[in-house]
Image: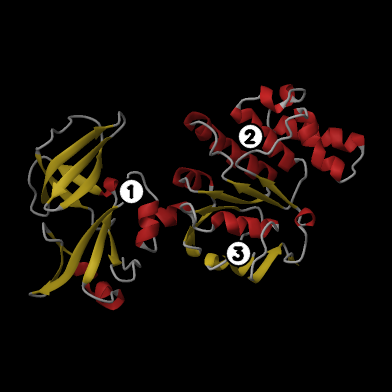
Amino acid sequence: MLENITKKFGDVVAVDGLSLLIEDEEFVVLLGPSGCGKTTALRCVAGLETPEAGKIYIGDRLVNEVPPKDRDIAMVFQSYALYPHMSVYDNLAYPLKMRKLSKQEIDEKVKKAAETLRIPHLLKRKPKQLSGGEQQRVALGRAIVREPKVFLMDEPLSNLDAKLRFYMRAELKRLQEELAITTIYVTHDQAEAMTMADRIAVMNHGLLLQLATPGEIYGAPSTTFVAGFLGSPPMNFVDCSFVEKDGRAFLDAGGFTLDVTDFASMIREKSTSTELQLGIRPEDMLVEQRPKTEGVEAEVYVVEPLGSEIILDLKIGENILKARIPPGVIPKIGDKLCLIFRKDKMHIFDTKTENAII
């Protein structure tokens, strides 16, 4: 558990009052852009950085004054940090030798870790003889043999190619569930976070913006930053004004208006002004060839065929929105289409506070 952790580097606040309760055996991902404070937070847990304020507990034990080696954690770095002159077996055995375990215990634990990671055939090799994926497995193995209370992982897949990264995501998640070890995982890759995490902590500028399951983060983002950071293509945002007329309520975006009478009372209650942002994900808009009474006319600006789907850039007035459609007949640039917003899937944000209203 992290309780109001603050860490500064000179005048820069890297982590700002971070509180985080992580359940036993849970896989929590710290997600955010470079410089958001996620790695600094991880290093505070590891004992590699000392926070100016706040408390860090591992289990029921306060560890602020406990040296890193005595915190019962194992850290996996982006760089793997393998000893090049040692064999894989000796790399795995090294942390156990430091704990002065017997040769028999070391041998049993090393072989068990190697079996778990399916690398027994690599034990006699040196790191330079291994592929990136194999080196990653050895780095994980060195963490596993220690049987720690907590795994700390700092972007461990970022050095792998896309195909291997995709494969290792599933392997890491399977491994964590099999070993049932509490894991804190740092990444800027939303796909890693969405596919691996039990819960995601989205950070920016040292602040925790939202902590929730991947489904909740994606479906009910708390701020425009969270909404825009997750999703590929990202959520569309349209600046608009809240207008009420003749007993109806509308979002006026200039190029189109959207009836939001059903949400009017909620908008009045939560907004700080009439200036709002409409947020809608590319898959939450229906694209029709023929005009519909509730639809908005849009012009095809760019077409991006991706095989399993097509991404359309659609121009409505001064706005360009991305829509995801299934493969089939591919529209041409300049075609006029009808765009229908799914109101049960749209989001409305307060422009001033950037907080979600709906």
Q: Which residue is mark 3?
A: 21
x, y percent for residue 41: 59, 59
Closer to the eye: label 2 or 3: 2
* Lateral position of residue 303 relative to residue 82, left or right: left
* Lateral position of residue 52 relative to residue 247, left or right: right
Could you tell me the amino acid type at mark 1? Pro
Q: Which residue is mark 1?
A: 234
* Earlier-in-chain disc, 2 versus 1: 2
* Earlier-in-chain disc, 2 versus 3: 3
| Residue found 77% across the figure and 35% down from its top | 92
| Residue found 56% across the figure and 44% down from its top | 155
Label 2, label 1: how many angstroms apart (C-alpha)? Answer: 30 Å
Q: Residues within 10 Å of mark 1 (few under 14, many from 20)?
A: some
Please say if 213 is above or below 52: above
Could you tell me the amino acid type at mark 3? Leu
2 and 1 marks in contact (CB < 8 Å): no
Label 2, label 3: how many angstroms apart (C-alpha)? Answer: 28 Å
x, y percent for residue 352: 30, 71
Residue 242 visible in the picture: yes
Q: Which residue is mark 2?
A: 136
Closer-to-camera residue (355/268): 355
x, y percent for residue 140: 68, 38
* Lateral position of residue 76 relative to residue 358, left or right: right
Residue 260 visible in the picture: no
Local SS, label 3? loop
Could you tell me the amino acid type at mark 2? Gln
Closer-to-camera residue (337/14): 14
Residue 110 shows which numbered tag?
none
Please say if 222 is above or below 118: below
Local SS, label 1? loop
